[in-house]
Image (cartoon, rainbow, N blue to C red):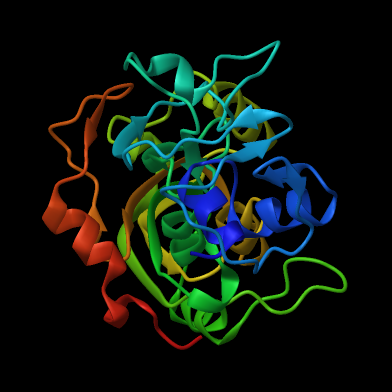
Amino acid sequence: MRLDKFLALASVGTRKIVRNYVLEGKVTVNNQKIEIPAAEIDENADDIRYLGKKVVQIGKMYYMFHKPAGCITARKDENSKTVLDYFDIDNMDGLFPVGRLDKDTEGLLLLTNDGEFNHRLMFPDKHVEKTYFFWAFGSLDVEAQNHLKMGINIGEDEALAKAIKIEVIEEGLYQELKDKMNINEINIHKVKDIRRDSYPQLVVSGYLTISEGRKHQIKRMLKAAGCYVVYLKRVSIGELILDESLEKGHYRELTEQEINKLYQNDLITSA
């Protein structure tokens, strides 16, 4: 087996990260420093170490987590609660989030110790679709929806951001729809600020699907279309849909069928 593949499978890091570790001389095989990521090793007989610590493969772990608002997508943080603070399993070595969700964004987040799995879902060239449900102040007429589908400018020196799909569910006045809006405590101050600017105001809800993962992409796309997001929830990745029986802050292992869905070639679409 290739050395970099073994290290990734052993949850030392993603393929890109472990290659750098090898190139930096941080990995030894049978007490010899190896600086070639593609070097062939015997995973059953060789003594492989990273920074002097023996690397041992553990079983692969795949979890679905219903992320609540208020925690950050990270392994550790000195100031905020992280998604891993919700986990209570015997061995969390190597477990990391697949991609990220903003602190105030809720919904489907996957965690794994499988670097190849992460690469397959998050590498930009794979174009795995991700769907989000939103509530926003503003409106999205047909022209605005077409603009989002054709590509919208969300930043200087950035390529246009395109919506794969967009579906408006509900539009109307805030006074009439406020009881339906899933505004969490983190975003409630935004609503107060917006309402001070003008009143009455239009609000809109819907689903938006993208195949990229730029920072704050959904919020920036809708802002460019004249909408201000006050609630955002990821509901699916590829064909995997958030299990709504899973309460916020709870997790479960992915089933074999769900893992296979995420590995299917037909998830890899063209942009």
Q: Position of residue 243 (x, y in %)?
A: 18, 41
Q: Residue at 65%, 69% (x, y): give it.
A: 38
Q: Quadrant of residue 186?
A: top right
Asked if residue 73 lies left or right of residue 193, the reply is: left
Q: Position of residue 60 (x, y in %)?
A: 33, 43
Q: How many marks?
A: 0
Q: Nearer the viewer, residue 133 or 75?
A: 75
Q: Residue at 42%, 70% (x, y): give it.
A: 128
- 243 w.r.t. 125: above or below: above
Q: Nearer the viewer, residue 202 or 221?
A: 221
Q: Nearer the viewer, residue 2 or 103?
A: 2
Q: Position of residue 135 (x, y in %)?
A: 42, 46
Q: Nearer the viewer, residue 181 or 151?
A: 151
- 26 w.r.t. 43: above or below: above
Asked if residue 129 lies left or right of residue 143, the reply is: left
- 88 w.r.t. 176: above or below: above
Q: Residue at 40%, 69% (x, y): give it.
A: 129
Asked if residue 183 lies left or right of residue 73, the reply is: left
Q: Residue at 55%, 59% (x, y): give it.
A: 41
Q: Quadrant of residue 246?
A: top left
Q: Position of residue 86 (x, y in %)?
A: 39, 16
